[in-house]
Image (cartoon, rainbow, N blue to C red):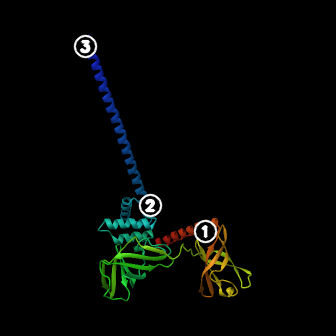
Amino acid sequence: MDERVNIVVDAFRTTIENVNIVAVIIVLLIFGLVAFFLVFWEKFEEFVSRRYMKKLFFRNGENYGLTRKELEILWKYSQKLHKDPFLVIEYKAPFEKVVQAYIEDDPNYSESLIKSMRKKLGFDKIPPFMPLISTKDIDLFQTGTLIFENRVFPVALYDKDEKYMYWYIIDKKPPFPFDKGKTVKIRFVREDDAVYIIEGTIQDIYEEDGKYIIKLPHTFKFLQIQRRRDFRLKINLPIEVTLTDIKGNQVKIKLESTDISIDGIGFCIPMQKTKDLRTGIGTEIMVRIEFEDRQIETKAVIKNIREAGKNLCYGAEFKDMDSEDKNFLIRFVQTEQQKLLRDYRKLKLFE
């Protein structure tokens, strides 16, 4: 009898263990299916979202006149560089990075297609007051100086394509101290912007139409030396300048600014009005500036003077400006700069 009971108990125990194993397997299968479904759903959502974004991107790009082939290139390399494609067609810097990736990846890249995209997006030129993004933005015939082993040679940008720039050596003929494979520097100045120094390895030197040309690769890297600390906005704002005459009396003159920056302001006064005024360099003055919804009154110090026709034009640096006024001026200059950029781009788009 005991033996029969033991057999029954063992059989029951085995059945329970088998049921537990089956239950565990079922639970694991359920968890596996749920995990697979979640991953699948996430990928599906990502696919649908990307497809929708691509459709939206194409629709947006077509408003600029971009062809489907051009948009396919911008979309493909935006994804490859993990850049927002919408920013690529709105801003020049990411656009140029994406184009460079296309050039490096595709040996049969189309230079005419790239130029077409630049023109349609208004990226073929940048305003003179904005810094360069790459050497592709240097204007043709920009003059500069080639530097090699402490020797200098006057040069001008003769031509450029998507990979190289071609600098003409002005009024100089061989022999040159440099040759293919040598590293040279080129220094040039952009008015209202900065001094630039670029460095590159000479790919070739050749003669064309009696000119000697140096071929250098494009680069996004260069030394930029600001000629002024802040962007100078050319704008005519009503201002009142308080100066002192030779007798020590205060004289208020109402006029308009010629430009303004975060650090200073420019204005011109007819010469005949300045005869009895103290307006030398280092003179402290008061300036009241009229904005649409605000006035700023601050001290300033005259830093430079120049003649312009029958006027004397002054550059004055702000002194001890109230911090609230300073913050307002910073926002004002930045906003106006963005307006200029938008207007400049619209002009390029409709040319």
- State the residue in front, 222 or 134: 222
The residues tagged by marks 2 and 1 sit, at their Cα atoms, a distance apart of 31 Å
- Tell which tag, 3 or 2, sits nearer the viewer: 3
According to the picture, the residue beneath numbered tag 1 turns out to be 329
Identified by mark 2, the residue type is Phe
The quarter of the picture where residue 182 lies is bottom left
Quadrant containing the N terminus in the rendered view: top left
Q: Amino acid at mark 1?
A: Leu
**Pointers 3 and 1 in contact (C-beta within 8 Å):** no
> Which residue is at a point 58% across and 67% down the rendered structure image?
330
The quarter holding residue 59 reads: bottom left
Mark 3, residues whose alpha carbon is within 10 Å: few (<14), some, or many (≥20)? few
Asked whether the beta carbons under mark 3 and mark 2 sit within 8 Å of each other, the answer is no
Q: Which mark is residue 287?
A: none
Percent across and percent down for residue 111 are 34, 71
Q: Position of residue 224 (x, y in %)?
A: 45, 74
**Residue drawn at the location 48% of the way across and 76% of the way down:** 194
- Residue depicted at 31% across the width and 29% down the height: 22
Identify the secondary structure beneath mark 3.
Answer: helix
Q: CA distance from mark 3 to mark 1?
A: 100 Å
Classed neighbour count for the residue bearing mark 2: other residues with Cα under 10 Å, few (<14), some (14–19), many (≥20): many
Q: Which residue is mark 3?
A: 3
- Expressed as whole percent of the image width and height from the top left, the position of residue 98 reads 38, 65
* In the rendered image, the vertical position of residue 139 relative to residue 49, given as above or below: below
Circle 2 sits on which residue? 86
Q: Position of residue 85 (x, y in %)?
A: 42, 60
Q: Is residue 77 left or right of residue 337?
A: left
- Secondary structure type for disc 1: helix
Amino acid type at image mark 3: Glu
Q: Is residue 269 left or right of 67 when viewed as pictured?
A: right
**Cα distance in 3D space between marks 3 and 2:** 81 Å
